């Protein structure tokens, strides 16, 4: 596979960083994941489009990688090309009036860079997203949220590239956002977004951001390797509370452990493997189902291939 792919991608078609058999554990917040056949970080849109064309002609699967913060990559790694848009990270003011500012944000912009930019300029609407890791594109794809604030709340439009290389802009109303979902297909790339924020006093926005960050630091193990909340909250109840009350805090498989701080976070204590994570997930699902009759559903995306022995 390695040689074939190296031959397929000629350098004149591609500007950016391209790595073969790149361990995904170096690119995920969980620090777990086998090798991607290719990990590509195109430097510009033309390189991305060229690469998608090459992949499609050669029937090689592609996987849009955001910040790697809400995914579990299996131990067999990713088949085909994982593509990161981390070079796409511009924030620009499109327009402003007395009440609102309209920003154009490229998909690879770290969500926390955007939250800080808004905080420094007194732009309100995304304070609740403070402390959520990952990219803006990833936050749109998973409709990231906390403290009653969701990414979709500020979106005006999203520009996407499909696997055939066609670029299309969608207004937010045309998209089907739900709780931690956006309806965006697995092979669609979010390229950029236009968002609308409200103009406030800088101190007001800053105080809200700091308050949410403090709550997070108290209630969530934000300093340890995790993928954020593992399961979605079932209607009207916290999955963390159910897992906690089912007695799962501190449960451990290999180096994977249910956090003692917030039970919906699984922590990699060292050299955990994806298989440890999945076994732990299944045990937690089983215990919660036995205790409460509720079947928890993963919030994180599980991708990649199993190890074939
Ligand atoms: N609780 C426990 N034990 C635990 C965890 C929570 O008893 O181990 C209790 C808390 O004491 C509280 C209640 O459960 O009474 C709710 O907990 P919390 O405020 O932490 O909220 P959550 O519903 O567990 C959700 C989101 C988080 C988001 C917070 C804050 C989901 C799955 N989780 O957690 O999002 O940060 O609210 O708004 O929607 C994420 O999506 O990755 C994530 C972390």
Image (cartoon, rainbow, N blue to C red):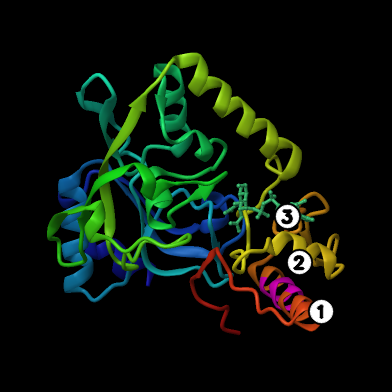
Horizontal and vertical percent position of residue 238 = 68, 60
Q: Looking at the image, can residue 11 be seen? A: no
The CA distance from mark 3 to mark 2 is 18 Å
**Residue topped by disc 2:** 242
- Secondary structure under tag 2 reads helix
230 in relation to 147, above or below: below
Q: Would you identify the image quadrant in which residue 256 lies?
A: bottom right
179 in relation to 100, above or below: below
The CA distance from mark 1 to mark 3 is 23 Å
Are the residues tagged 3 and 2 within 8 Å (C-beta)? no
- Secondary structure under tag 1 reads helix
Instruction: Count residues near mark 2 (Cα–Cα under 10 Å), then give few for <14, some for 14-19, many for 20+.
Output: many
**Residue topped by disc 3:** 267
Horizontal and vertical percent position of residue 35 = 50, 63
Q: Is residue 51 magenta?
A: no
- Main SS class of the magenta portion in the image: helix
């Amino acid at each position: 596979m390695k040689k074939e792919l190296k031959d397929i991608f000629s350098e004149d078609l591609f500007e950016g960083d391209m790595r073969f058999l790149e361990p995904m554990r170096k690119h995920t917040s969980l620090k777990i994941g086998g090798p991607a056949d290719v990990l590509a970080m195109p430097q510009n849109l033309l390189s991305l489009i060229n690469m998608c064309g090459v992949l499609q002609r050669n029937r090689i699967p592609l996987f849009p990688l955001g910040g790697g913060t809400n995914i579990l990559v299996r131990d067999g790694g990713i088949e085909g090309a994982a593509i990161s848009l981390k070079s796409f990270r511009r924030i620009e003011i499109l327009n402003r009036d007395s009440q609102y500012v309209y920003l154009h944000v490229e998909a690879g912009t770290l969500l926390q860079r955007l939250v800080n930019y808004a905080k420094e300029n007194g732009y309100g609407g995304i304070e609740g997203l403070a402390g959520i890791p990952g990219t803006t594109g990833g936050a749109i794809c998973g409709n990231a949220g906390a403290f009653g604030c969701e990414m979709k709340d500020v979106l005006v439009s999203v520009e996407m590239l499909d696997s055939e290389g066609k670029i299309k802009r969608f207004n937010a109303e045309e998209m089907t956002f739900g709780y931690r979902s956006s309806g965006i297909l697995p092979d669609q790339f979010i390229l950029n977004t236009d968002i609308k924020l409200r103009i406030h006093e800088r101190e007001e926005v800053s105080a809200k951001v700091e308050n949410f960050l403090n709550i997070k630091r108290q209630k969530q193990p934000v300093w340890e390797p995790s993928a954020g909340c593992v399961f979605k909250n079932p209607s009207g109840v916290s999955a963390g509370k159910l897992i906690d009350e089912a007695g799962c805090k501190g449960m451990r498989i290999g180096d994977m452990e249910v956090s003692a701080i917030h039970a919906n976070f699984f922590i990699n204590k060292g050299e955990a493997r994806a298989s440890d994570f999945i076994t732990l997930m299944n045990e937690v699902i089983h215990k919660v189902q036995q205790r409460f009759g509720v079947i928890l559903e993963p919030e994180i995306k599980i991708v990649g291939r199993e190890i074939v022995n």
